[in-house]
Amino acid sequence: MTHTQPDPDIFLYDTMQRQKVRFVPTTAGRVGMYLCGPTVYSDAHLGHAKKEVAFDVIRRALMHFGYSVRYVTNITDVGHLQNDSDDGEDKLLARARLEQLEPMEVADKYFWSFVSDMDALNILKPSINPRATGHITEQISLIEELIARGHAYASNGSVYFDVRSWPDYGKLSGRKLDDQAEGTREEVRGEKRDPRDFALWKKAEAGHIMRWDSPWGVGFPGWHIECSAMSLKYLGEGFDIHGGGLDLQFPHHEAEIAQSEAAGHAFARYWMHNNMLTINGEKMSKSKGNFTTLKDLLMQHDPMVIRYLLVSSHYRSITEFSDGAFESARSGYRRLGEALHEIERHLPTAPAGNDAALDAKIAAHRKAFEDALRDDFNTPKAIAALFGLTTDMNAAINAGPVGAATLDAAREVYRTLGGGVLGLFSGTSTGAAAQADEAPVVDALMELVLQARQNYRLNKQYAQADELRQTLTRVGVTVEDTKDGPRWRK
């Protein structure tokens, strides 16, 4: 059951403060979250899955603990240059040329591809999903504020943030300005006062398709400015949580903080970053040949197994993708799903009443789960609590009839915590919730199958009985012969 009053005892790791701190929202009972979204120029990859699942669980947990959450995640469809800096071609333009499409065709194609992948992973849709190209006016206004305050300057049709005018630049990552590399490109050095200054607005050269009018000439926004403009617009001054991958901490998030605060706006109060992932022990890289898109992965694995693998490691830990990791995730998810299935299977015929001792164990596992999430959203410990519940429920069901009220309480823990918070038991037709919904039909069919096998054995048609059992084994159904008759489990 979701908490009716916001929980005051949630602690999170704030990257800015470099420690766990108690979470206190700006407005009681309400949370404003901003997550840096994808640049929609190609299909989503595993890194997107890690980030999106991590913050989806954080959002779900806050909602479970009684908070109303406005969750904003942007879509970058202009301004993200290939070198993640101020030189190179716009990633959307490069892909548009490669696929012989208009840039907005590319943006729409990969936006909907991203949405499809996130739906498969059971990611809740954002409250607001703003696009950079839809907020050019807000970005220009913010740049004008920075120029007026002396923290930005126009140069040859472009506008740059003057990092030396803002002494706090580098406070998130801990990089002192004088220790940062200055770079050597002469054209960048000549256009900027300092090579470490970053672009707020870029002049559109002749033939550049994506272009807008501005006070400084025809051009397009830099990569960093969109997130400041859109987060402030939809979440307001001093909003609660800004999230993103660890790889965005510098320079992207550092630039967001500098340009927002230099313009006179209170910015994010808590900064949260998810760690990266490895594939067979190595960082994912196209050059290493281990680059995998989510679409490829979804063709090989149940989406809920992928999600289980992601939540089985802490969001601030590295997640390993390998055959062994997937096999372990598949086994773990199957065990939890089977436990829920068994509860659903026994509920219709369970006797009335409850078991007080088992109820106490269920409540203890629920508390352990919630305490784990209160402690910086520790999903591995939360899953461990579900396994503890699974062990107790399996033992109780095997020992004899369990009261309907107790079974229902256990089912509610799986569905509310495992499903509602971790997002594991819904969102896919192969998920445990769907299996549970089909339980009455499956049970009736299995009763007929087991009766047919029993008839074979009574008529000494052992070959047919064994063949039927082997067929069930091949599709993942185990038949056990007990003193009380045959039993089956998936």
Image (tube, helix red, strand yellow):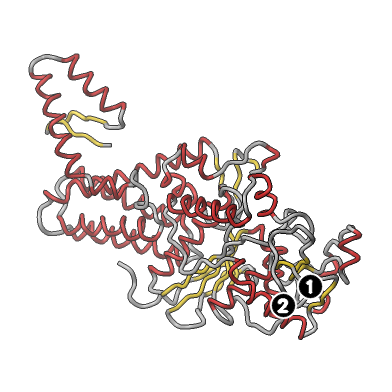
| Badge 2 amino acid | Ile
Q: Residue 83 is drawn in which quadrant? A: bottom right
Residue 453, percent from left and from top: 15, 24
**Can you tell which mark lies on residue 57?**
none
Q: Secondary structure at mark 2?
A: helix
Location of mark 1 (residue): 159
Query: Vertical placement of 307 versus 218: above or below?
Result: above
Q: Quadrant of the C terminus?
A: top left
Asked if residue 62 lies left or right of residue 52, the reply is left
**Can you tell which mark lies on residue 143?**
2
Q: Quadrant of the N terminus?
A: bottom left
Asked if residue 365 lies left or right of residue 407, the reply is right
Residue at image point 40% right, 43% down:
332
Asked if residue 258 lies left or right of residue 316, the reply is right
Residue 116, percent from left and from top: 46, 51
Residue at image point 17% right, 41% down:
441
| Badge 1 amino acid | Val
Residue at image point 83% right, 66% down:
196
